[in-house]
Amino acid sequence: MRTIPFFRASTPLTPAERLAKRHLVFKDTLALLSVFAVTCVLAVLTWLIFRSYSQHQSDAAARWKRRGEQALKNHNAKAAVYDLQTALGYKQDDPATEVGLADALAQAGRLQEATSYFNTLWEKEPGNGNINLQLARLAARQGQRSVALERYQAAIYGVWEGDGTVRRRQVRLE
């Protein structure tokens, strides 16, 4: 039986073989660096395109939101609903736009949808005075007296942006 030694004594390379080996290592290194450079360039381009797209989405959302708010000021609830829904399509989870949309739905007479939106917002912020006030108004419009009273009380003791004491007094009077 013949055994194969694990380590063989290698014969020294000739100068031409050493030069060929160096040339091969150089070519492989150059190829690897080229692939790395191309990958870096593509990563930067991808990041720039994504950033541009994100900025475009934010701009479109802001533009549609402004249109919706303007439509609400002009008492055009139907157009406001469309504009604010479009704004939410560009930028989801924007609480201010969601409140505006729910308000526009209420003004358009779509009470069930408005109640659904406000209930979803209420689940996120149960102590928000404005959301509780809007839910109270919707319950009153639908003839749900006990629900309206509960929501009015929650609005009185809720958190308000700006001058809370003035808003609480207005809710009590309402």
Image (spheres, grey):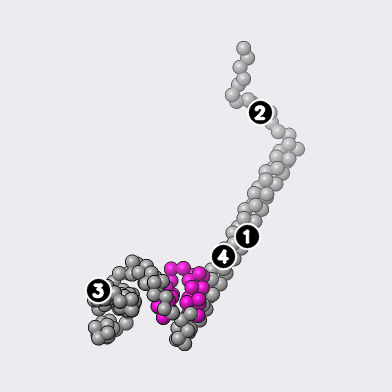
How far from the left and from the top, in percent, is residue 100? 42, 77
Q: What residue sits right under mark 2 in the picture? A: 10
Q: Which mark is residue 98?
A: none
Q: State which quarter of the image contains the C terminus.
A: bottom left
Q: Tell me: 64 left or right of 100.
A: right
From the viewer's side, name the closer residue of 83 and 8: 83
Q: What residue sits right under mark 3 in the picture? A: 146
Q: CA distance from mark 2 to mark 4?
A: 54 Å
Q: What residue sits right under mark 1 in the picture? A: 41
Q: CA distance from mark 1 to mark 3?
A: 64 Å
How far from the left and from the top, in percent, is residue 45? 61, 63
Residue 55 higher or lower than 11, as above or below: below
Q: CA distance from mark 4 to mark 1?
A: 14 Å
Q: What residue sits right under mark 4 in the picture? A: 50
- The residue shown at (27%, 73%) is 147
The tag earlier along the polypeptide, 1 or 3, is 1
From the viewer's side, name the closer residue of 93 and 170: 170
- Of all residues, the one furthest to the top in this rendering is 1
**Image quarter of residue 145:** bottom left
Q: Are marks 4 and 1 in contact (CB under 8 Å)?
A: no
Q: Please say whether residue 82 is visible from this viewpoint.
A: yes
Q: Amino acid at mark 4?
A: Phe
Q: CA distance from mark 1 to mark 2?
A: 43 Å
* Label 1: few (<14), some (14–19) or many (≥20) C-alpha neighbours in 10 Å: few
The boundaries of the magenta stretch are 79-107
How far from the left and from the top, in percent, is residue 9? 64, 26
